[in-house]
Image (cartoon, rainbow, N blue to C red):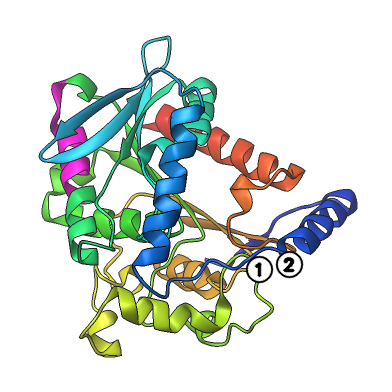
Amino acid sequence: MAHKLWPASEPELAEMRRFNQKLAWMPRFKIRNRITPRLIQALLRAGQKIKKAPPAQCTIVDSVPVRILRPSVQPKGVVLDIHGGGWVIGNAQMDDDLNLGMVNACDVAVVSVDYRLAIDTPVEGLMDDCLAAARWLLTTDEFAGLPVIVVGESAGGHLAAATLLALKQWPQLLQRVSGAVLYYGVYDLAGTPSVRAAGADTLLLDGPGMVEALRMLTPGLSDEQRRQPPLSPLYGDFDGLPPALMFVGELDPLKDDTLLIAERWPGAEVHLLPEAAHGLIHFPVSMARGVLGYARQWIVSRIGNA
């Protein structure tokens, strides 16, 4: 499906450009070793201990920790959230603000997966964790009969797409999934053309090091092996998958990942975000608020149509 250019106003574009000037001065996210991600993860957890978290149930399902946020009313659906962080940092709690926004706007419960990280576990293990959490959510009595939406951002977009492809083994479970919201995911672990062409002027992500980072994530594999689905969801069979809503920034090195997978995904709706870098939904700009609002309306619509 052809992408749509997000209808940003000139003031919104100017705001985005000003924010990009700030991003240009910030360090780029790099995966070069196992030490730096461990340090970032320790800082993340220290900050989370200070910040007051919303009421959440933390439990373990099929050996995988999950974090559950519930609405104050009877939920109309349930979201499976898969956080980003380049597969090497992050946890379920880091998405609390975004997930609480979905809880309040959509009257859904959110189950966020605390999958293992690739500093200690092969990426296939992360995929197994997300699939186990999805199968539990789709079979537990607590959420029986509720429509399910899968949400993933960046590396979480990769894991979300891989999870949906793996669920084709259980068609009755996949039928419960009403849609997917994917923010600027990574769908080719050998590197799409925009990844391979990324230069030093990329924002947030380290463009020149991205291909090597993907190789570090998948040691011992050839590029042809890296492209095998579901490891690289871009090359999977999307027949039978639910509709998907996708977003990617015009300045994101991962732009081609989203545009290419949308061409193969029946029922995909994809928006190209002008002047936007990777990570947009976390930026304090009006375009990010508009994207999140649109995604939440889409979730409400998909749940209502289920």
Q: Is residue 144 left or right of residue 106?
A: left
Q: Mark 2 and mark 1 in contact? Answer it, CB < 8 Å.
A: yes
Magenta stretch prevailing secondary structure:
helix
Q: Is residue 176 left or right of residue 25?
A: left
Quarter of the figure with residue 274: bottom right
Residue tagged 1: 203
Nearer-the-camera pick, 1 or 188: 188
Seen at 46% across and 34% down, the residue is: 48
The answer to if 60 sits in the magenta stretch is no
Q: Secondary structure at mark 2?
A: loop
Q: x, y (%) of residue 164?
A: 27, 54
**Residue stretch in magenta:** 131-141
Considering the image in quadrants, where does the C terminus appear?
top left
Label of residue 24 in the image: 2
Q: Amino acid at mark 2?
A: Ala
Quarter of the figure with residue 226: bottom left
Q: x, y (%) of residue 69?
A: 37, 24
